[in-house]
Amino acid sequence: MLEFSILNHTTRFDDGVYPSPLSSELALTNAKEQLAIVMPFPTGADLGFELAFPIPQGYVSTPTIVFRGIIDGTPASILAFGAQQLGVDDSESIDQAYEAEDLHSNSTWTGYADEDMYEGTITLTPAAVYVAGDMVFLKFYRDDSVDTSTWNFLLVDLLFRYTEA
């Protein structure tokens, strides 16, 4: 399996989602100035961002989104993320709806506390198989229809994981 970060210059944030230094979001004894994307808990609508990235040469299968972030609050209830994507190739229109959502949710917080790192995955299920060179338009968000938590998630990386030839 290979993976690469897909947070890039094409990222567009929903209202309420924003980049911020970890030290501004957490009451840390040992300051960390690295940026995170603050993903607040949803209160009536999905909250996240949209971006685009290319499918690399050598791609074969198993498209997975890996997200890593820090829990900002006491973890409880259901944390849920969704991803919707659209893969397009050369001479194909981007004027199409995102495909059905793929989900990740967790409600088991044994061993987790405020300021702990959390990693999750979402397996993407594109209607048409990705091929090297496709451009993927992705919407990544906290899913309001599933997420019942009341704490923020501080995203520090979003990766595309795949199997290579």
Image (spheres, grey):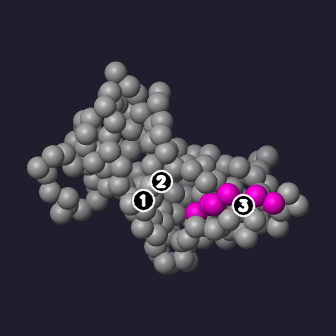
Distance between the alpha carbons at the discs numbered 2 and 3: 18 Å
Instruction: Place residue 62 in its image quadrant.
Output: top left
Residue displayed at 57% across by 46% down:
120
Q: In this view, does 139 lie to the left or right of 70?
A: left
The label nearer to you, 1 versus 2, is 1
Badge 2 element: loop
Residue displayed at 55% across by 71% down:
18
At label 1, counting other C-alpha atoms closer than 10 Å, the crowd grade (few under 14, some 14-19, many 20 or more) is few
Q: In this picture, is 67 found above or below 96?
A: above
Q: Is residue 109 left or right of residue 40?
A: right
Residue 143 visible in the shown view: no
Q: Mark 3 points at which residue?
A: 33
Q: Is residue 95 left or right of residue 77?
A: left
Residue 87: x %, y % from top left: 26, 48
Q: Name the residue under label 2.
A: 7
Rendered image: mark on residue 72: none
